[in-house]
Each structure stands twice: as structure tokens, then as C-alpha cells.
Amino acid sequence: MDNSTIAAVATPGGRGGIGIIKLSGPRAVSIATTIFSPAESKLKSTPDKTPRTKENSRGGFQSHRLYLGHIIDPENRRIVDEVLLCVMKAPRSYTKEDVVEINAHGGQIAVNTILELVLRQGGRIAEPGEFTKRAFLNGRIDLTQAEAVIDVINARTDKSLQVAAAQIKGQLKRSVEQIREFLIEFLVRVEAGIDFPDDVADIVDAKAAVGEINACVIQPLKRLIQHHLDGNILREGLKVSVVGRPNVGKSSLLNRLLQRDRAIVTAVPGTTRDTIEETLNIKGFPIILADTAGLHDTNDPIETLGIEKTMENIEGADLVIFMIEANCSLTIEDYKIFNMVQSKPFIITINKIDLVNGKCPIVLPDSWMGKNSVEISALYDRGLEHLKEKIIFTAFGKDPIDVEIAIVPNLRQKLLMEDSLRESEIITRELENGTPMELIAIHLQEAIDSLGQILGTNVKVDVLKEIFSRFCIGK
Ligand SMILES: Nc1nc2c(ncn2[C@@H]2O[C@H](COP(=O)(O)OP(=O)(O)OP(=O)(O)O)[C@@H](O)[C@H]2O)c(=O)[nH]1
Ligand SMILES: [Mg+2]
């Protein structure tokens, strides 16, 4: 176990009201004592209900209490900044180690100078995510909760945040633990069967075991894996591509949904050359909306490049908004684009409904009938609520993922669940075929290990490194 004392600036760079310097480790309090001069002359004299044992008044500081004072350079006694300092003593802290937080004024120079002083007194600069890594290594949180911390920091909308916050509370951890405990209990029975081969049929009832594994392992794992597919969109954002002929109003729609003039809009066909992506929040879901170059036959080399980008964007999209105009009959190009978007879920969006007094004269061909369609006016803000509902409905179905109860594994967790599921399915087949218990035990151990890696009980060092490298410094 690393015995160093780590330090970092926890607030983002630039000017701000406050900047926080965080320390964690065995020397955190003694470093604070060396560079902090309290406004009250005697730290110990401040009234406090906590019994004043040697332990909880270490360094003169009482735990979980804010002290006003100055950071002073011990070499020249120069005042660096007026600060509020808080000591959180082990184990009642984020990392379960002694933690000190210094709330300084938010200028970069003040914050960096204090960090430098801390480092000079024996602290070491923290790696990205190292505070959370210590919280994990010291057993305060499991790996699923540590990973949820990144999701909270990166949350794009309130729904994404709700899912991540539930995970920090340990919902995913509890589900995985429950499945794993069942498998461990079953392994104990299987091993007893190996030790007492004559009684194996009494110890392990193969038929009943198949049913139990199905109900307690296979079905719950399948549900969690499905949640990854549905819920990952909350983490990554739903990719929606707006495509159509030039001039149908794609950029106007982007601007209207964003409520600002992000893309250039003109009456000249072929205005948008490059794909423009922006993130917006539709009913709590993060949507990455791409406005694309209009699709048509052209010899213009710039437009051709733009059209190639549009095709790439369609390829990577989760959903396509296929836009046509209410005031023009369908063209051969519209038919071509219709065929092009067939591989994706799409919404036929008839724009410029204002130009036809709200009555769309376009008769959609039979083959287009029954497809999702909606009439809008991007210019006059008509039908957009309906379009938003269609986007959510098409992407998530009638019951969009219930964030109150959703447990959403990330990709790493999902892959390990798939490993465990595969092994569990092999086990049920082997039980049905009467395979010897020794072989079943091997697959059980594999299934248990994969779930253990999700929780972090037997995870490899390089995997940990990879997970925590995705954090920012100071967390
Ligand atoms: N009347 C009316 N005009 C619209 C509407 N939406 C867009 N327009 C007009 O249609 C023209 C083209 O709009 P854009 O948003 O630039 O169309 P686009 O599909 O992005 O066009 P390209 O970038 O060339 O592919 C502009 O003059 C817009 O003002 C609408 O709902 N009603
Ligand atoms: Mg455009």
C-alpha cells in the first residue's frame, strides 16, 4: 500500500471565487500545521463537543471543522493567502485517510503557490483519480461506486446524473453481489458433491439447480446487460443525424432546438458544408444532434466532401431525422435518401408546414406509409414538441428507461457480465447432461471471478490504472 501523502488542486483552472487544494495521507495534518496559521491563536481552545482525546485533536485540529487563518510560507514567513482549512481525520474521510482541504481564493497563482508549499513539505502530486482510488483500495467504496464517480462528473443531463448517483449509493454493487453470493453458495454444494461422490445426487439436485441458476443468475444478468444497451445512451448521449436534400431546413431545426443561431441558414441550397454537432437536453436525455450537408448529386468538390461526411454521420447515428419539405413534391433525391436511411430508426420530418397553411399536400408513397412521421415548422416553432416526443419514443420505446430504478452497467461491467452469463449457461447445460461436478466447479469459479472483477475484489492492476486514468486530477 502506498504510504505517501498526495495533494492536488481539486477545482478547475482559471479564475474563480474559491480554489480548493486537497491533501490525503499520513502526513496531511502535519503539512497543514507547518503552513497554516490560524486566526484564533490557540487551535485547541476553540469550543467543541468532541471529547478532546489525543487522536481527534491531532495537530491541534479538530476533525470536520473549518478554521479561518493564513497560509504562510515557512521559509520566509510571507502570507500567501487567507483561507478556510478543514481537517477530516481517518477513517471519517473520502479516502479513509487523514484529509485536509484548503479553501483558498480562486486565483491560479494563489492556488498553485499553496500546492507548491504542500509539495515542498513532503506531499506528492496526486495522479488523476488517485483520491477515489485510495477510497476504493481502503475499502470505503467498491469499484462500481468508484466508476460512478466519473459518471457523476461527466453527467450531461439530470437523468444521466440520477443514474450515476444511484450507482454511487451502491445499487449496481448490491445486484452483482446478490448474483455472486448465489453462485458461491452453489459452488459450496458442488464441492461437497465432489467430496462425497456417493451422495452427489442428494447434495445437488441437478434439475432444481438449473431452474435456480436460470432465475437467480441468467435472467438477472440478461436484464442488467439489456440495461447497458438502453441506458448507455444516458452516459454517452443519443446520436441523432438530421439529413435531407439541400434547403429543406436542417440547419434551421438545429438552431431552433438549440435556441441560438449555431449554424448558418440561407435560402441558397448547399449552405451547410461540414457536419455540425451540438449536445442538447430533450426531456432529460442527452442528445447529440448533427446538422449535415444536404444530400444531392453534385460536382462541387467541397459539397462532395460534405456529403461524404453526412454518410459517415448516418453510419454512426442511433436515430435519423429524415427531413422533407411540405411545399414541394417529393423528388428523386428524397427517394434516394429514404432508401439510404433504412438501416437506422428514422423519423420522416415534414418541414415548412407554415407555407401550406398547416395542411400538408404531400402524399407519401405507400412504401413510406406506416413509418414514423411528423409535421413541423422549424422557422415558426411548430410541431417541435411532437418531434421531441417522437425522438424519445423511437429511441427508448413507450417506457423510456426509468432512471429511478435503472441500474446501468458501463461497458467494462457489461463485458464481465457477459463472461459470467456465458459460463452460467454452460453450467446449466452441463447439469442437464450429467457432466462431472469437477468440471462444473471450474465454470462456476469463472462465473464468480468475472462478477468479482466488477466489484473490484480480484481486479488486475492495469485494469485499475485504466479506470482511474479517466478521472480528472483532484478527484
Ligand atoms: N417558411 C419556412 N422556411 C423555412 C423553414 N425552415 C427553414 N426555412 C428556410 O429555408 C431556407 C433553408 O434553410 P436551411 O436551414 O439553411 O436549410 P438546410 O437544409 O440546412 O440547407 P443546406 O444547408 O443547404 O442543406 C432558409 O431560407 C430558411 O429560412 C420553415 O419551417 N418554414
Ligand atoms: Mg444547412
Image (spheres, helix red, strand yellow):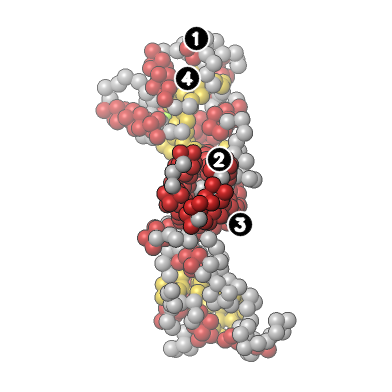
The foreground one among 281 and 207 is 207
Q: Residues within 10 Å of mark 1 (few under 14, many from 20)?
A: few
Residue furthest toward the front?
Answer: 198
Quadrant containing ligand 2: top left
Which of 132 and 71 lies nearest the eye of the viewer? 132
Mark sitting earlier along the chain (2/3): 3
Q: Which residue is mark 1?
A: 366
Identify residue for label 3.
169
How far apart marks 2 and 1 lie (CA) works out to 53 Å
Query: Residue 82 in the image: x percent, y percent?
Result: 56, 78
Q: Residue at x 39, y 63 (%)?
A: 461
Q: Are marks 2 and 4 in contact (CB under 8 Å)?
A: no
Q: Earlier in the sequence, mark 3 or mark 1?
A: 3
Q: Indicate the secondary structure of the residue bearing disc 3.
A: loop
Q: Is residue 18 above or below residue 308?
A: below
Q: Nearer the viewer, mark 1 or mark 4?
A: 1
Q: Which mark is residue 207?
A: 2
Residue 333 placement (x, y as % from top left) = 38, 16
**In the displayed structure, would residue 423 be above or below residue 304?**
below
Question: Residue at horizontal 56%, vertical 51%?
Answer: 203
* Foreground disc of the pair 2, 1: 2
Q: Are marks 1 and 4 in contact (CB under 8 Å)?
A: no
Q: Secondary structure at mark 4?
A: strand
Secondary structure state at the residue bearing disc 1: helix
The amino acid at mark 2 is Lys
- In front of the other: label 3 or label 1? 3
> Residue 6: x percent and y percent?
45, 74
Q: Of callouts 2 and 4, which one flags the residue occurring earlier in the amino acid sequence? A: 2
Q: Which residue is mark 4?
A: 324
